[in-house]
């Protein structure tokens, strides 16, 4: 794990070990996303070690990729919010519908990853592409862990 990613992890954990009782769940989600997004570019840059010329080609494609992934992350968060808001009155059909929505979103995320991998292959080495996806995965896991930490299990 790079020093930059370790620093982000510590910052991330520190931010959320403080009491947030005055904030709503939406505020916590936005704060989590903000912390991750603020450092995402720096973490990716540190893990890829791009030259200026490589970066000039990579960053526009990466921003396009992040836009596609960000929209899907918002869909995922919306389903989590629907689960939480309907928790007390949720019946089996509603719960299954939410699960199916998550499967659909996960499929779309996989499609985006598959769509962009060959495009990244054209401008990065194979090891850099793997590191990019590893870094993205670690950042997403961190964010989803924080977003879902207070979400109860279905009854």
Image: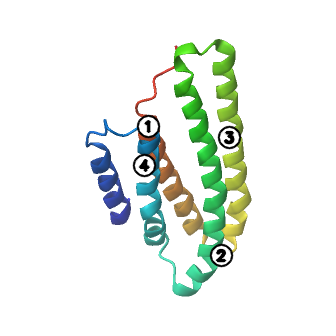
Residue 105's disc number: 3
Q: How is the image coloured?
A: rainbow
Q: Residues within 10 Å of mark 1 (few under 14, many from 20)?
A: some
Q: Do the residues labelled 4 and 2 touch (CB within 8 Å)?
A: no
Q: Earlier in the sequence, mark 3 or mark 1?
A: 1
Q: For numbered disc 3, what is the local secondary structure? A: helix
Q: Can residue 146 be seen in this view?
A: yes
Which residue is farthest front? Answer: 22
Query: Residue 78: percent from the left, percent from the top?
Result: 60, 38
> In this figure, which residue is indicated by the disc labeled 4?
32
Which residue is painted at 44% across and 56% down in the image?
Answer: 34
Image quarter of the N terminus: bottom left
Query: Residue 80: percent from the left, percent from the top?
Result: 56, 33
Q: Which of marks 2 and 1 is nearer the N terminus?
A: 1
Q: Which of marks 3 and 2 is nearer the N terminus?
A: 3
Which residue is painted at 26% across and 39% down in the image?
Answer: 19
Image-based side of 43 in relation to 75, left or right: left
Q: Distance between the residues labelled 3 and 1?
A: 21 Å
Query: Residue 129: percent from the left, percent from the top?
Result: 59, 65
Pair 3/2: label in front? 3
Q: How crowded is mark 3: few (under 14 residues within 10 Å), some or many (20 or more)?
A: some
Which residue is painted at 27% across and 49% down in the image?
Answer: 14
Pair 4/2: label in front? 4
Q: How far apart are marks 3 and 2 (CA)?
A: 28 Å
> In this figure, which residue is indicated by the disc labeled 2?
123
Image-based side of 67 in relation to 10, left or right: right
> In this figure, which residue is indicated by the disc labeled 1?
25
Q: For numbered disc 1, what is the local secondary structure? A: helix
Q: Earlier in the sequence, mark 4 or mark 2?
A: 4
Q: How far apart are marks 4 and 3 (CA)?
A: 20 Å
């Amino acid at each position: 794990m790079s020093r930059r990613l370790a620093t982000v992890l510590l910052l991330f954990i520190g931010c959320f070990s403080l009491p947030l009782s005055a904030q709503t769940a939406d505020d916590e989600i936005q704060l989590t996303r903000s912390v991750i997004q603020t450092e995402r570019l720096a973490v990716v840059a540190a893990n890829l070690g791009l030259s200026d010329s490589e970066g000039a080609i990579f960053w526009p494609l990466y921003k396009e990729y992040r836009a596609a992934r960000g929209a899907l992350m918002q869909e995922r968060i919306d389903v989590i919010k629907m689960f939480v808001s309907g928790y007390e009155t949720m019946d089996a059909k509603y719960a299954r519908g939410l699960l199916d929505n998550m499967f659909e979103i996960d499929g779309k995320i996989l499609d985006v990853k598959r769509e962009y991998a060959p495009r990244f292959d054209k401008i990065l080495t194979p090891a850099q592409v793997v590191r990019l996806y590893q870094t993205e995965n670690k950042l997403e896991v961190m964010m989803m862990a924080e977003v879902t930490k207070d979400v109860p299990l279905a009854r």
